[in-house]
């Protein structure tokens, strides 16, 4: 399949090079259309958000477009704090102008008066390129008042995150732009109605917005012919861990996970067997090596009770200890929990203590049951997606690798990775 988002020519860092390569042609086309026609084209494409929740983009745009307000905002979410996720960085690094053009099109469609590009704070190496891109776009009349004599006024401001994973959650991100601590807000009201500065706001992931250009350039019918009936187009996957070629890959939805790993990423170093793969980032499900022959599509993952999340794929060979892996994930969530609600704040703390005890061979009878109970409470009672989804890898490891986890309670780490302590409670389970 030809790529829809990544192109070979994607090293168009400057405004001039982008314009010379027919850049902004989709925007010129869009500005001649009525906003509702643009939203219809996007709705027809069946594009869904790539930031994790997979919500239909056309529907979200209509919600904001239909709000009656003197001010509306659009936010491009480039916080990308999920470990192992680096696709948005690649999009912004290779061709920032594409993202700027996409944001302007979406802004015109919903009647936004101002946009924010909220970029992960650690991406210092691309900050200057994007800021220069915004300045040049403004100078050339594609941002600011009366864009290309269309009567549309709109500008974009660059904002840096400061290293908090929770600020990728859209309401926490909004709090952060407003100058407060990035704690999530209660929903409803949804951001489409009451968002940034209390005004209707459209929040989209970088990759979601990048899809607007192929939809405009190809038309929604051709766009839809890529992928599967309910997962149209392509998806970027950030692949890391035990693969020969780590990196960001664009594949059509419906490609099998096995093909992605063995054909595109060159397989596992030293031809070792895959023990497990985590899909969707740190809160993604974990699948054992024998289950790799599945389609990468929303419908397939829905059947597994999961999603594709941010598109991060972590591959682990036989040398990886499932407990060691879980422990590092648990420490991440403990560190990143904002602390606003008890199930997540205390649950993540409790889980990392339990898992650390397992690693040291100090597990106690009933710990596994406590772990499961804590996970269930977190899933059901946490205030936002962070606490609700943090237990997912633990529960899937318990489903497929319970005996390996239990061996630690008997004082044995099968891979020899865990620091079993002398004198721990080595139980006969
Ligand atoms: C803890 C947490 C972190 C998130 N981080 C990101 C992020 O870095 N980038 C992103 O686009 N969405 C992130 N999201 C999802 C956003 O809240 C929101 O759903 C998304 O930006 C909407 O964009 P989309 O419709 O294009 O998917 C996160 C959600 C949660 C719960
Ligand atoms: S679930 Fe976690 S991150 Fe979300 S509000 Fe509660 S404490 Fe904060």
Image (cartoon, rainbow, N blue to C red):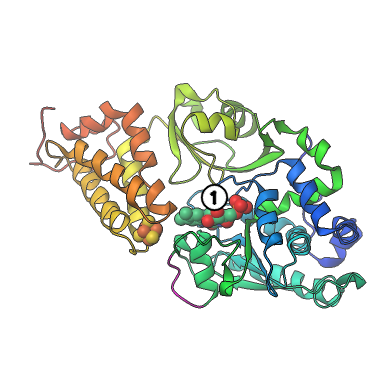
Magenta extent: 179-183
Q: Is mark 1 within 8 Å of ligand 1?
A: yes
User: Where ligand 2 lies, by image quadrant?
Assistant: bottom left
What kind of secondary structure does the magenta stretch mostly adopt?
loop
Residue at the spot 43% in from the left edge and 45% down from the top edge? 283
Q: Does 303 appear above or below 389? A: above
Residue at the spot 57% in from the left edge and 62% down from the top edge? 191
Q: Is residue 88 visible?
A: yes
215 left or right of 420 in image:
right
Q: Does 102 appear above or below 57? A: below
324 left or right of 185 in image:
left
Q: Nearer the viewer, residue 224 or 265?
A: 224
Residue 340, percent across and down?
A: 34, 64
Residue at the spot 66% in from the left edge and 33% down from the top edge? 230
| Residue to which mark 1 is pinned | 85
Q: Which secondary structure lies at badge 1?
A: loop
Q: Is residue 7 visible?
A: no
Residue 180 on the magenta span? yes
Residue 413, percent across and down?
A: 24, 33
Q: Quadrant of the N terminus?
A: top right
């Amino acid at each position: 399949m030809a790529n829809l988002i990544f192109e070979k020519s994607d090293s168009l860092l400057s405004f001039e090079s982008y314009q010379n390569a027919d850049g902004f042609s989709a925007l010129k086309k869009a500005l001649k259309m009525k906003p509702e026609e643009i939203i219809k084209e996007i709705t027809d494409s069946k594009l869904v958000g790539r930031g994790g929740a997979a919500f239909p983009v056309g529907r979200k745009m209509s919600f904001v477009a239909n709000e009656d307000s003197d001010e509306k905002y659009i936010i491009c979410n480039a916080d990308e704090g999920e470990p192992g996720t680096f696709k948005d960085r690649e999009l912004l690094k290779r061709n920032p102008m594409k993202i700027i053009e996409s944001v302007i099109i979406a802004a015109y469609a919903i009647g936004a008066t101002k946009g924010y590009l909220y970029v992960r704070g650690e991406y210092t190496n691309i900050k200057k390129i994007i800021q220069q891109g915004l300045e040049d776009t403004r100078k050339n009349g594609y941002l600011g008042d009366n864009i290309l004599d269309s009567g549309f006024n709109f500008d974009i401001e660059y904002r840096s995150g400061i290293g908090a994973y929770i600020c990728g959650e859209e309401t926490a991100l909004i709090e952060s732009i407003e100058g407060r601590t990035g704690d999530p807000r209660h929903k409803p009201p949804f951001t489409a109605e009451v968002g940034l500065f209390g005004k209707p706001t459209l929040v989209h992931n970088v990759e979601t917005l990048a899809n607007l250009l192929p939809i405009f350039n190809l038309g929604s019918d051709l766009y839809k012919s890529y992928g599967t009936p309910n997962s149209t187009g392509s998806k970027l996957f950030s692949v890391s861990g035990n693969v020969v070629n780590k990196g960001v890959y664009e594949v059509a939805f419906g490609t099998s996970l096995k093909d992605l790993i063995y054909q595109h990423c060159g397989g596992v170093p030293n031809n070792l067997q895959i023990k497990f793969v985590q899909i969707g980032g740190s809160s993604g499900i974990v699948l054992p090596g024998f289950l790799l022959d599945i389609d990468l599509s929303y419908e397939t993952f829905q059947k597994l009770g999961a999603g594709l999340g941010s598109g991060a794929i972590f591959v682990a060979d036989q040398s990886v200890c499932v407990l060691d892996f879980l422990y590092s994930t648990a420490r991440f969530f403990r560190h990143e929990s904002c602390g606003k609600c008890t199930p997540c704040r205390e649950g993540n703390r409790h889980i990392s203590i339990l898992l650390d005890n397992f690693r040291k061979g100090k597990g106690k009878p009933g710990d596994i049951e406590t772990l499961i109970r804590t996970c269930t409470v977190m899933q059901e009672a946490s205030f936002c997606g962070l606490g609700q989804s943090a237990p997912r890898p633990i529960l899937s490891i318990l489903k497929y690798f319970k005996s390996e986890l239990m061996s630690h309670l008997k004082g044995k780490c099968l891979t020899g990775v865990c620091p079993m302590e002398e004198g721990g409670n080595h139980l006969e389970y």
